[in-house]
Amino acid sequence: MAMGALLIETIGLSKDYVMGGETVHALRDVSLSVGKGEFVAIMGPSGSGKSTFMNLLGCLDSPTRGQLFIGGEEVSRLSSNRLAAVRNRKLGFVFQQFNLLARTSALDNVQVPLIYAGMSTAERKDKALKRLDEVGLSGRLDHHPSQLSGGQQQRVAIARALVNDPEIILADEPTGALDSKTGEEIMALFQTLNASGMTIILVTHEQNIADYAKRTLTFHDGEVISDTASSDRIKAAQ
Amino acid sequence: MNIFASFKVALIALRTNALRSVLTMLGIIIGVGAVITMVSMGSGAERQVSERLQSLGSNLLMVSPGASRQGGRRLGGGSGMELKEGDATAIARTIPGIVLVAPEVRGAAQAVLGNINWSTSIIGVSPDYLLARDWEIEAGRFVEEGDIRTAAKVAVIGATVREELFGESLAVGQTVRINKVPVQIVGVLKAKGQSAFGSDQDDTIMLPLSTAKKRILGQSKAAPDAVQLITVKVQQGVNMNAVMEDIATLLRVRHRIANGAIDTFSIRNLQEMQEAGQEATQIFAILLAAIASVSLLVGGIGIMNIMLVSVTERTREIGLRMALGAKQRDILFQFLVEAVTLCLIGGLIGITIGTGGAILVSNLAGWPTLIRVDMAMAAFAISGLIGVFFGFYPARKAAKLNPIDALRFE
Ligand SMILES: Nc1ncnc2c1ncn2[C@@H]1O[C@H](COP(=O)(O)OP(=O)(O)OP(=O)(O)O)[C@@H](O)[C@H]1O
Ligand SMILES: [Mg+2]
């Protein structure tokens, strides 16, 4: 199923939460791989472990058991500093609630990852301008999040995710807070990015959103219960 | 992330909560402001005292009758208990390392010129008194040997007396009645200002020692050659304590004081008095430091409290920054810089207010103040250190957050 070179590989990835003596198995032995240039949608009922899985892929949380490889490097063993570097250089996040810095211009928001990458001011501004142009927001550089529509905020967030040239975009319900038309526009943007080679993994509850992806993983009770190419599913439906 | 960017981020964060930032700084502002004002006042007072003592000259010994440092015990007067002119002569003749010896008597008198009546202090002096006490002649001359021999009715007046009696007109050559005795003014002294103890040194009339005793003050029958004070000017570089010891030994012999008996005279060293003054200012400084530390401690705790609130409020922001690649030390640095910036701004405001307060005190109350740049710089640096010290715990708390927990924090 993998298209290009192997980018992500999980082996028996598990996450347990212990809550007051009771153990919740949020993720059970997930083993899968994602190749470079793939566009993956993750679906499944609420509480099935989608976000837990995404957080592990995003190096924001550490697994209870199992291994995670990103670009051949086993990240499940790295120190917090090394993980920060992986997040900074290899991953781009898009959140449901956009998560932009308040009272900070679109241009400055997009530059945040580059600040932590230690880039010079001029270079930072250059890259941020380029990405904001790419998401169609060159006319809104000085706007603060409160002066932007939801769709525009999510575009700023996408520009921010792209700005340090990551290998993977991770998006947990990126259209969840948007109306369906705006959501489709955001998905069209993701599709364009994927067409130019970007690997994208996103979580959604909506079939029409998942249809933009090329591959769909379905979670249930912490396990992957189906892994299909979207084209197969459409064929099957016909 | 470079340091300028950090300060910029910190300033933006502080500006978004301007009122709270100012309230947080208040402890530091008040602490630093109080220290600056008090140090300025203390330094001003210290400088004034030391300048006045310095104006007397530091290599002076003052020999006076009566025991010093002997509790409240009073020694009766009488033969052998007083200092005499002979003592002064003996000191000058036998003790090595001495420049001048100047005996004096003091008293109060009325000076009358026409219908002007001025009460002032009078000093009976020898010619050496001028040099011994670092006086200078403004016009005319000082008391001379011949005046002493003949008990001449001549006087040298201080600037205040000249001002009061003569105003703008010429004083030298005029005759003034001092305690009804007509005395000719032969000289005017240069103004010296206040003494270390706050009295006007220029409000005085100096007469030959013999004239003062015989004609003006009236001398005691029991001790016609008694003097009240002998000023001894010691040569530069000579050990003052050795000279003091020599004088004491000489006087004990002359006054027939038995071994172990209480001295009937005391010798004071002006340098010692100066050091005593400095000791007092040191105690003042310690007190000041204690007050300052307490208020800065309170200010620091205020900073810590607000930084903890700020960390909690901005947990999601911290999580986001971590997701975008901030390392623990980036977060630590961000909050530390914020705390330090808060303290430095507070320190600057405190220094400004404190300096303004000192200027106000000196203008309104006439208190001598001295603005100390080194103190202001130290206060600024200490403000920064307070920021580091009290900002460290909250900043570390922020840096140790788990990215996903911080990001999901509600
Ligand atoms: N921090 C946590 N502590 C305890 N249990 C947790 C924690 N986070 C998630 N869980 C549990 O893990 C399971 C999976 O949660 P997860 O957030 O991954 O679900 P999800 O598939 O993303 O659901 P949704 O579609 O509602 O976002 C749930 O049962 C949840 O209660
Ligand atoms: Mg979820």
Image (spheres, coloured by chain):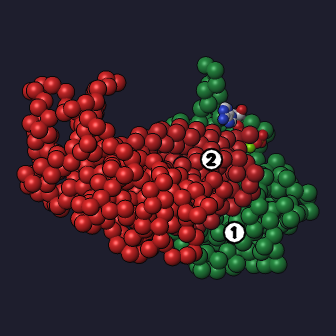
Instruction: Categorize mark 2 by other alpha carbons within 10 Å: few (<14), some (14-19), many (20+).
Output: many
Report the quarter where the N terminus of chain A lies.
Answer: bottom right
Chain coloured green here: A
Q: Amino acid at mark 1?
A: Asp
Q: Amino acid at mark 2?
A: Ile
Residue at image coords 34%, 72%: B141
Chain under callout 2: B
Eyeballing the image, is B356 above or below A110?
Answer: above
Residue at image coords 14%, 35%: B255
Which x, y percent locates residue B170? 51, 76
Residue placed most toward the observer, B54 or B155: B155
**What residue is shown with label 1?**
A108
- Left/right placement of residue B325 relative to residue B320 reads left
Contact between labelled residues 2 and 1, with CB atoms less than 8 Å apart: no
The kind of secondary structure element at disc 2 is helix
Is residue A203 visible in the rendered image? The answer is: no
Eyeballing the image, is B207 above or below B223?
Answer: below
Q: Quadrant of ligand 1?
A: top right
**Chain B: colour as depicted:** red
Which x, y percent locates residue A48? 72, 38
- Left/right placement of residue A95 relative to residue B370 reads right
